[in-house]
Image (cartoon, rainbow, N blue to C red):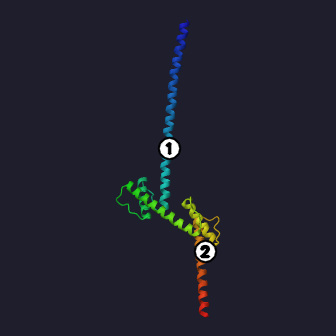
Amino acid sequence: MKKNKILGIAVAAIIGISSVVPAFATEDTAQEQTTNTLQTESKQLSKEEKLAKLTKKAERLGVDITALSVEDAKTKIREAEAVKLGIDITGLSREDAKAKIKAARETNKQEVTERLTKKAEKLGVDIKGLSAQEARTKILQAEAAKLGVDIAGLTNKQAKEKIKAAHQEAKAEKNVSVKESTRSDSAI
């Protein structure tokens, strides 16, 4: 009897263990399916995000990419960037064109940095360690302070316009005062 009880317990344990293994296997499969579904959704999202980025870039460059495939849109944008940078990429492979555009961007970036540095030195502003955008903002603030113009709360574009108007006004006043002094000198 004891042998039958032990045999029964052993058989029950074996059946119990064998039914547990498929249950865990099913969970793994379900997790893999969920993971695959999430990855597919993220790929679709990334395609949508890519298209949104391409559209934004195309708008900035003034290029119409509606009804174009992603690859055609990338090609059109790449060509527009090359034109904007003043380089010729006709006949180049996609990788070569990307490399040439990247090199032109780096050169352009260096030139912009040099111009900003010269302008900052002229105004007596320290822009070390600042990004190009931060440096532009700091330079605009220095120019505005020099001219006595309030640019608080304005965008950089609006600030530039206001500073340009102040420069023109100062130039006009200078021309008027020079003409008046010339007239007074000739009257003497």
Q: Position of residue 55 (x, y in %)?
A: 48, 57
**Tag 1: amino acid:** Glu
Q: Which residue is mark 2?
A: 166
The structure residue drawn at horizontal position 51% and vertical position 41%, both measured from the top left corner, is 38
Q: Quadrant of residue 6?
A: top right
Q: Is residue 34 left or right of residue 143?
A: left
- 59 or 149: which is nearer to us? 149
Q: In the orientation shown, which residue stands out farthest toward the left?
A: 91
Mark 2 Cα within 10 Å, few/some/many (few <14, many 20+)? some
Q: Which mark is residue 1?
A: none
Q: Is residue 128 left or right of residue 71?
A: right
Q: Position of residue 163 (x, y in %)?
A: 59, 71
Q: Position of residue 151 (x, y in %)?
A: 63, 67
Q: Which residue is mark 1?
A: 41
Q: Quadrant of residue 148?
A: bottom right
Q: Earlier in the sequence, mark 2 or mark 1?
A: 1
In this rendering, the answer to whether 11 lies above or below 109 is above
Secondary element at tag 1? helix
In this rendering, the answer to whether 17 lies above or below 144 is above
